[in-house]
Image (cartoon, helix red, strand yellow):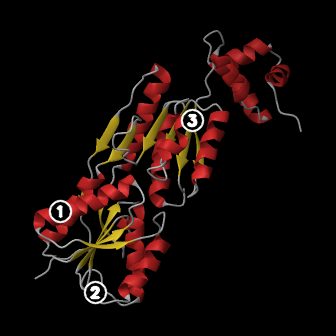
Amino acid sequence: MKSVTLKDVAKAAGVSYATVSRALSGSPQIGSETRERIIKLCDEMGYTTNYVARSMVMKKTDLIGLVVPSIDNQFNSELAYYAEMSARSHGYNIMLCNSGPDMKQEKTVVKLLLGRQVDGILIVPQSPKTYENIRAYADQVPTVFLSENLRDQPQSYVAVDNSRGAYIGTKYLYELGHRDILYFGRRHSTTHQLRAEGYMKACQELGLRQRFFNSEFSHSSINNGYQLARDLFSKSLDYTAIFASTDSNALGIMKAADEMHIDIPNRLSLIGFDNITATGMPRIELTTIEQPKREMAVQAVDMLRDKIENGTQGYVHQILLPTLIKRGTCRPLG
């Protein structure tokens, strides 16, 4: 099989190679009628731009690598969607990679992106160890971390105020009359450590007993939340509300509660974190803490573009505010 070249298009159009090249680049030297005829012919013949050859000349690929732990996580998929839309609006394409739960795989995909000569990398890290894991590679290309608070690490990142979000959610449950609030989640990342800290801060200020049901899973999912909730609900319910560290966990809790005939919200109030699309669907209507995913993605892309296009040095820590989304899974007591 032979790919179609500019010379093939020029021959079919009966014009010079230079004319075809100028037509495709939008040169004002080519009339609109000729340009339209050549573009139509390119489409009919199946011509595609050789971006490898172009990048060698331009010293730029217009490619941004995006690394996420798992695209089947709805929060990651929504974040990736907004990042791609933002990048595309500025002339960049996204090369998406799943890093999975394996630190070696995370490093492998970053090395792959460097080998593909991407102009920059956006990365949703697996854990607090990610920065050190890929540091030698991140220093070679403009890099922005997304959705993970690296605290004081000297790397640019965009994240939500996770501690504030958990604090807001816990205080909301308190205002509804709940005094026995269980925190349901994991602490394998800085993000989840901060959420747990926000819950603890609220409990301390409000005089509540801190109660944890910790997940040993390395990532959040509906199935993991469901399995943990089945175990949790097999014991007596001496709490009136659950703060789930992610919406995925919360959806798993709702599934287990339904199977075990635990009425949400009449028997148990529930709040999640992220505001993924599924939480607003009928019969779910999950109360949750919203991460501004679109704004996070847009700001991360803009931050990365500034590094790529202007050579901006140093780093920026951008923390966005979360919002409480009140729906139907929390009820007032008394």
* Mark with earlier residue (1, 3): 3
Task: Determine whether, in the image, residue 314 is placed left or right of residue 268.
Answer: right
Judge whether 127 appears above or below 325 on screen: above
Occupied quadrant, residue 272: bottom left
Query: Callout 2 environment at 10 Å: few (<14), some (14 to 19), or many (20+)?
Result: few
Res. 137 mark: 3
Q: CA distance from mark 2 to mark 3?
A: 49 Å
Q: What is the number of the mark on residue 237?
A: 2
Circle 3 crowding by C-alpha within 10 Å: few under 14, some 14–19, many from 20:
some
Residue flagged by tag 1: what amino acid is it? Ala
Kindly identify which numbered label has been placed on residue 202: 1
The residue positioned 38% from the left and 77% from the top of the image is 253
| Residue at image point 24% right, 58% down | 198
Q: Amino acid at mark 3?
A: Tyr
Q: Quadrant of the C terminus?
A: bottom left
**Residues marked 2 and 3 touching at CB (< 8 Å):** no
Q: Which mark is residue 155?
A: none
Q: Which residue is pictured at 29% across the width and 61% down the height?
A: 196
Q: Quadrant of the N terminus?
A: top right
**Image quadrant assignment for residue 59:** top right
Closer to the camera in the image, 333 or 50: 333
Task: Tell me the SS state at disc 1.
Answer: helix
Residue 322 locus on image (x, y percent)? 27, 52
Looking at numbered disc 2 in the image, what kind of residue is underneath it? Leu
* In the displayed structure image, the side of residue 185 where residue 220 appears, left or right: right
Q: Nearer the viewer, residue 226 or 295?
A: 226
Q: Position of residue 319 (x, y in %)?
A: 30, 43
How far is mark 2 from mark 1, CA to CA? 22 Å
User: For residue 117, what is the image quadrant?
Assistant: top right
